[in-house]
Amino acid sequence: MTDAALQNDRPGARATAKDRERQEGPSSSGRTVTTRRTGRDLIGLVYVAPVMLVLLVVLIFPAIFAICYSLLELKSVRPVGFAGLANYREVFSDPAMAAVMVRTLAFAVITVALTLAVALAVAVFLDRLTSKRATLVQILVILPWVISTIVGALLFRWFFVTDISPGVHLLSQLGVDEKPLTDPTLSMISLILVAMWRTLGFAVLLLLAGIKAVPAEFYEAATVDGARPWQQFRLITLPMIKTPLTITTVVLTMSNLNNVEAPLVTTGGGPGDATQILPLTIYQQAFTHFDFAGGAALAAVALVLNIGLVFAYLRLAKWSV
């Protein structure tokens, strides 16, 4: 046996070689894994870059621009100085602003509650239908959500705006002589119905998906135990769909707090200020009264509300049964 073989055969030499392999091997494999991970990250970044660019242009940059404008003193849309919080104080010192906030909250809460109640009933009904009938009903329910909000609001306005319109005729047959869009109470009810009709299909889809995910064995066991349909709904369906139900509530709240098309087209904020809600006030403050600083201040407040709802959505999206 040669001297080199004797040296390699020593226990210390074998241990040193193993240590060298142990040190070099993971380092090499680690570099390979890191390289692959970096490549996947770059590919993913390329895929999402167009979407992020669109979000920057149409959402993030305008939001930053509005916040900056809300802190400036404007004259003919040109900044002439720094105003600080003066625009916010001026806007919220208006006595009508408190009524706008209360009206906005009432509109959002009532609309979301009615939409959830009707959507849940429709989802349960669809879950018990056969495939062909369920598909037909789903198309009818989703159709208002698919069409443009402006088109839907115009159709609703046409339905109630004239003496010979179908809606006014139906109300007269029920003993209601007032026109919905000229009576303060009926105009708010009309606005709520427009918003509910518009978002009903979205809520039905989410809740129906949650109901379909409930294992059928739960209902079979409840039937064997003698539970009635209402008891099954209350003790099985509702607890099992709490996650999609909560997420739907957050999304609908965001939608109604930012709904400017329906009040603008359907009622215009009237009669009087009966349907004047925050999104419409922001629009009118900037583009009707040309108070861009005040409109930007209100938009910044609405942005804070939306950010809070987005964080709530992200937290609740991870919430499981």
Image (spheres, grey):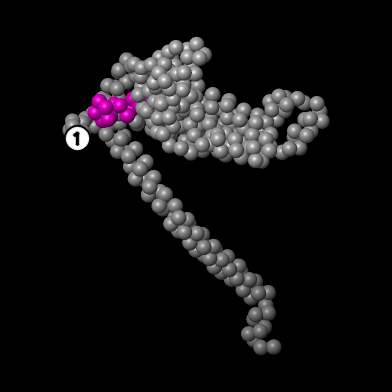
Q: Residues within 10 Å of mark 1 (few under 14, many from 20)?
A: few
Q: Is residue 163 visible?
A: yes
Above or below, 152 against 188 in this view is below
Q: Nearer the viewer, residue 64 or 261?
A: 261
- Quarter holding residue 296: top left
Above or below, 132 against 51 in this view is above
Q: Is residue 23 visible?
A: no
Which quadrant of the rendered structure holds the N terminus?
A: bottom right
Q: Which residue corresponds to mark 1?
A: 78
The residue located at (57%, 26%) in the rendering is: 118
Range drawn in magenta: 275-293
Q: Is residue 265 left or right of residue 170?
A: left
Q: Position of residue 55 (x, y in %)?
A: 39, 45
The residue located at (36%, 17%) in the rendering is: 271
Q: Amino acid at mark 1?
A: Arg
The residue located at (33%, 28%) in the rendering is: 282
